[in-house]
Amino acid sequence: MRVIALTGEAERCEDFLAALSLHYTVATLRQEHENALTFAANGVSDDLLCIKSPTRYVVTRYAHENANTIPRELDRLGEQEDVDFAVVVGSVLASRIVSFREVYEARLERSVDFEKHFEALKTFPEWVTLGVLVRAVRAHPDIHKAGAILTFTGTVRGEAVALEFDIYEEEAEQRISSIARDLKTMKGIVEAKIYHKSGHVKRGEDIVYIVVAAAHRQEGFEALRDAIERIKKEVPIWKKELTEQGERWVDM
């Protein structure tokens, strides 16, 4: 699944969605006010998040104060549904996701050619979740040689309100790719995928995913340990810890 932050003239945005939906499976997330009276009667904000996908249509409260509301919904779409594109419509919602992972920003004016965006989207990175990586590992042509698929998920511990990761993107991608390649040369390892988030990650949220397919579980455990230690030592990532008492830079 690829994620688009769609802004600009409302009519052009609708035309873009219609054109995209002709060729791909599309889910949309947008702000709604249609049911404002019903929600207001219950003492709830009239800012609603409308989520329309191939398998569901739901309107829920949109929490402005929680920057992770939209990314969490995108994670659910990526994990649970077979969607080619998730389109976050409107500047209010789009502003909530442009700092999260891979988001394609499309601002539409009268003169904008849709085909330019469609071509760019063909090679744009996917919105990464643990499930996406597991599916990619399972798709390996030699997966029949694996007796185990093991995963590691690093999360933000409770003592921190959030962590901020400053990543030297190009170098970090090269180092992470190198680590994944090296894992695949280890005894018994069939496939390996690694993904590390950047930016602001709140308490309880995921930081890093590692997935390995191995002939035997012990070989998989060894590969996971190796990957974790090498990421900490070799990848140019700087971590700032935000707590109730203040903030500080800490070692990876």
Image (cartoon, rainbow, N blue to C red):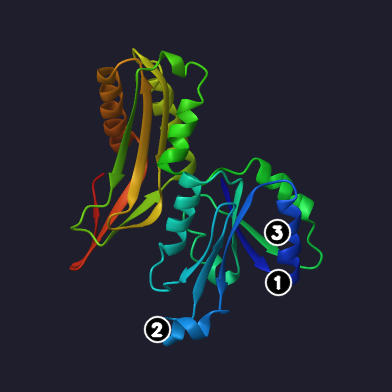
Q: Residue at x 36, y 39 (%)?
A: 209
Percent coordinates x, y for residue 173 in the rendering: 46, 37
Q: Nearer the viewer, mark 2 or mark 3?
A: 2
Q: Amino acid at mark 3?
A: Leu
In this figure, which residue is indicated by the disc labeled 2? 42
How many residues crowd around disc 1 within 10 Å: few (fewer than 14), some, or many (20 or more)? some
**Which quadrant of the structure image shows residue 64?**
bottom left
Q: Amino acid at mark 1?
A: Ala
C-alpha gap between disc 3 and disc 1: 11 Å
Q: The residue tagged with tag 2: helix, strand or loop?
A: loop
Percent coordinates x, y for residue 224 in the rendering: 29, 28
Count of residue discs: 3
Quick one: 96 or 21, which is closer to the camera? 21
Q: Is residue 117 above or below residue 126?
A: below
Task: Give the mark nearest the N terminus, 3 or 1.
Answer: 1
User: Where is the N terminus found, in terms of image quarters?
Assistant: top right
**Which quadrant of the structure image shows residue 40?**
bottom left
Tell me whether circle 3 and circle 1 mark residues in contact (CB < 8 Å): no
Tell me whether circle 2 and circle 3 mark residues in contact (CB < 8 Å): no
In this figure, which residue is indicated by the disc labeled 1? 10
**Which quadrant of the structure image shows residue 188?**
top left
Report the side of 8 relative to 194 (left or right).
right
Q: Amino acid at mark 2?
A: Asn
Q: Nearer the viewer, mark 1 or mark 2?
A: 2
Quick one: 44 or 149, which is closer to the camera? 44
In this figure, which residue is indicated by the disc labeled 3? 17
Q: The residue tagged with tag 3: helix, strand or loop?
A: helix
